[in-house]
Image (tube, helix red, strand yellow):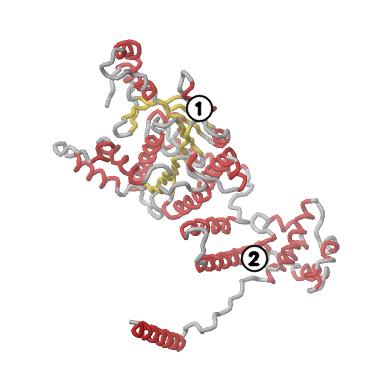
Amino acid sequence: MVNSLEGDKDHMTTVKANVTALSGALPGAPSAKEKEYKEPYNTEAEQMVLGAILVDNEAIFKISDFLNADHFYEPVHGRIFAAIQRFMERGLTANPVTLKNQFDGDEALKDIGGAGYLVKITGLATGVVHVKDYAQTIYELAIARSLIRLGNEMVEDMYDTKLEEPPSKIVEQIEQKLFKIASDGSSDKNFAHLKSALAESLRRIEQAYKQKDEVTGITTGYRDMDRMLGGFQNSDLVILAGRPSMGKTALAINFAMNAAKHYQEKYAKQEDKTEPCPSVGVFSLEMSSEQLASRLLSMETGIGSNDIRRGRLDDKSGEFEKLVAANRDLYDLPMYIDDTPALSIAAIRTRARRLKRKHNLSLLVIDYLQLLRGVSKVSESSRVQEVSEITMGLKAIAKELDIPVLALSQLSRQVESRDDKRPQLADLRESGSIEQDADIVMFIFREQYYLERTKPADGSPELDEWTQKNGERWMQCRNKAEVIISKHRNGPIGNVQLMFNGATTSFKDLEQDYQYSGEAPF
């Protein structure tokens, strides 16, 4: 056996040597010596930009929204640019004479001519008109260098067999660094004249006027809620809060499915399909994607979710065939679910941006806020600071991607200690920043949930007394849910009543006469 192994090793060594020799003989094959690459840069462009600013300090305002000192390849050029910025912030003129004292002791500048170098680049840039084009070249080359360094860092990490983090975690870190590279120094938005904002506002008003309905944003799927909110609006952060078992996740999934169906129907009628169909993204940090899918099937078929989970289907009613048909209807629904647990706010932002780019993300649902993690050092020591960072991050995502972000939130236990269990803004758990950063805060409340827990067991002597005392109230609140809109930055506040089917965790519009009939529709 030993001789056989030794023979195999010799054979493999020979094969490797032959392959190496053959690959070296192939045209265009890499040589044994690794090719040395140089980082891309353009010294002349850097000189032109600096010279143009020294000639006319006002030129810096054309480029300062995307270019900073770190983007210059030559360190001395970065220091000159930073010095010019400091002078201008103090209201001083920056030119070779005023900057001379700043660089008399700069060793790097001495090697290329000292303070006289400033005079030289000023002379080279005389008459330069397109300073923004040169600055754009510098910026793009800086991005290229950052990508090269990140690529090298990634290769080194992957060759390291003693990784402290799993490769999946490193992928997330790389995505965050790519996002930073893409956004660092760039600014898509800046000051705009009022006329631009007025034109956009008038365009939206005209669009709403032509629609002839009350939904100007993304429909919630519920008549009274759309009437009060006008739908979920782009760039809004919407908080849906409640105590456990109130139906937060159920209502959020109903919102998501209603919006996805609306997008699908509208896109099917649309002639221009150059862009993908708008989609709904769901970050489910508590439930698995399979559990959410089962809920969707239950909502669509009317079969109880508990029966679906246990496989208790009625053959006579054709419930399995109903599930198959519902699965077919929901199969192409533009909804994407990420059930990765304990995501950071940075990971949410990265994945949301990717979904926006690939699948035209138009509504983001997060279940739920308290399961997210912050990323800053400050947030590690304070849960209040962490929640503040998370809510600010969610609002930033809503504005950056121009979509509504619906985030679920838990309420503190102080609700349970009150006689009136209806939640209030003060009940939002862990941080006042949730109320502060949100455009809409709404609570879900089901009185039936609390009343059920006071009901004596069937057959007990106390049941008759409880029925006499609470019977009418029970019939009025049975199968009803109340959505309390406590904050609405751009509209009215108030209450919306919905029907709730606990078996299928689905919500429907409340019929106008239900509260008087005392009958449950389910």
Where residue 432 sits in the image (x, y, percent)?
57, 33
- Sequence-first tag of 2 and 1: 2
Nearer to the camera, 412 or 515: 412
Q: How many marks?
A: 2
**Label drawn at residue 377:** none
Nearer to the camera, 194 or 458: 458
| Residue at horizontal 50 percent and vertical 25 percent from the top | 414
Which class describes the residues within 10 Å of circle 2: few (<14), some (14-19), or many (20+)?
Answer: many
Residue under label 1: 486
Mark 2 or mark 1, which is nearer to you?
1
| Residue at horizontal 36 percent and vertical 46 percent from the top | 289
| Residue at horizontal 47 percent and vertical 83 percent from the top | 29
Q: Is residue 9 above or below residue 374?
A: below
Give the CA separation, mark 2 to mark 1: 50 Å
Residue 489 visible in the snapshot: yes
Q: Is residue 295 above or below residue 496?
A: below
Residue under label 2: 138
Which class describes the residues within 10 Å of circle 1: few (<14), some (14-19), or many (20+)?
Answer: some
Where residue 351 sits in the image (x, y, percent)?
47, 52
Name the element at disc 2.
helix
Q: Amino acid at mark 2?
A: Ile
Nearer to the camera, 60 or 106: 106
Q: Quadrant of the N terminus?
A: bottom left
**Dividing the picture into quarters, in which one does residue 433 lie?**
top right
Where residue 79 sits in the image (x, y, percent)?
75, 62
- Horizontal arrangement in the rendering, residue 520 relative to residue 13 (left or right): left
- Horizontal arrangement in the rendering, residue 478 relative to residue 413 (left or right): left
Pick out the residue farthest to the left.
316
Q: Is residue 12 above or below residue 479?
A: below
Q: Amino acid at mark 1?
A: Ser
Pick out the residue farthest to the front.
2
**Dividing the picture into quarters, in which one does residue 53 lie?**
bottom right
